[in-house]
Image: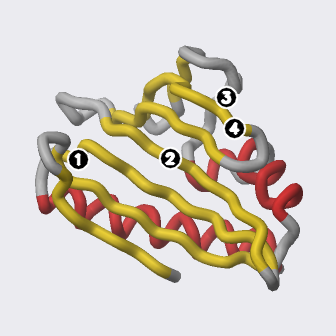
Amino acid sequence: MKNTTAPTKDEGWDVGVRQTIAVPLETAWAFLLGAGLPIWLGNTRLTLTKEAKYATDDDIFGHIISVSPKARLRMTWQPGEWDHDSTLHVTVKAVAGGTVVGFEQERLASRSERKAMLGHWKDVLARLDEALTR
């Protein structure tokens, strides 16, 4: 698993994690947007059209910014207790041995928020890997 954390100019902090999962890209993409959706986003319905809104049972909400099928989903992501949203990129890329699944979150408010989200996305990737490869 690879991860990055850094402050970004004028946009707060960002964090990124990615991991190769031993499944084909099509399998990973379909799982992320289907049965695996509760693992990384929560219980919700996600409509893959620009500006479509979503809200989860865990009080996370936002809207779709853009979708590149079988490549990238870009969306806003905000827990109810935050006073700001962030931008979340979910990416998949075919590589030898499987698919790299990545989560990058931008516009985090602080170092502590970044640290919390790094732990969160690392856990999400571990759970996705287990669900896809068991």
As measured in the structure, the alpha-carbon distance from the residue carrying label 1 to the one carrying label 2 is 13 Å
Q: Nearer the viewer, mark 2 or mark 4?
A: 4
Report which quarter residue 5 is drawn in. bottom left
Check disc 4 and report its element: helix, strand or loop: strand
Which of marks 3 and 2 precedes in the sequence?
3
For image coordinates 35% across by 34% down, the residue present is: 78
Report which quarter residue 7 is drawn in. bottom left
- Where residue 6 appears, as percent x and y from the top left, is 22, 64
Which of marks 4 and 2 precedes in the sequence?
4
Amino acid type indicated by mark 3: Leu
As measured in the structure, the alpha-carbon distance from the residue carrying label 1 to the one carrying label 4 is 24 Å
Contact, mark 3 vs mark 1 (Cβ under 8 Å): no
Which of marks 1 and 3 precedes in the sequence?
3
Amino acid type indicated by mark 4: Ser
Q: Which residue is mark 3?
A: 46
Q: Nearer the viewer, mark 3 or mark 1?
A: 1
Which of marks 2 and 1 precedes in the sequence?
2
As measured in the structure, the alpha-carbon distance from the residue carrying label 3 to the one carrying label 4 is 15 Å
Contact, mark 3 vs mark 4 (Cβ under 8 Å): no
Residue 49, placed above or below residue 2: above
Q: Which residue is mark 1?
A: 108
For image coordinates 46% across by 71% down, the residue present is: 122
Report which quarter residue 4 is drawn in. bottom left
Q: Which residue is mark 2?
A: 89
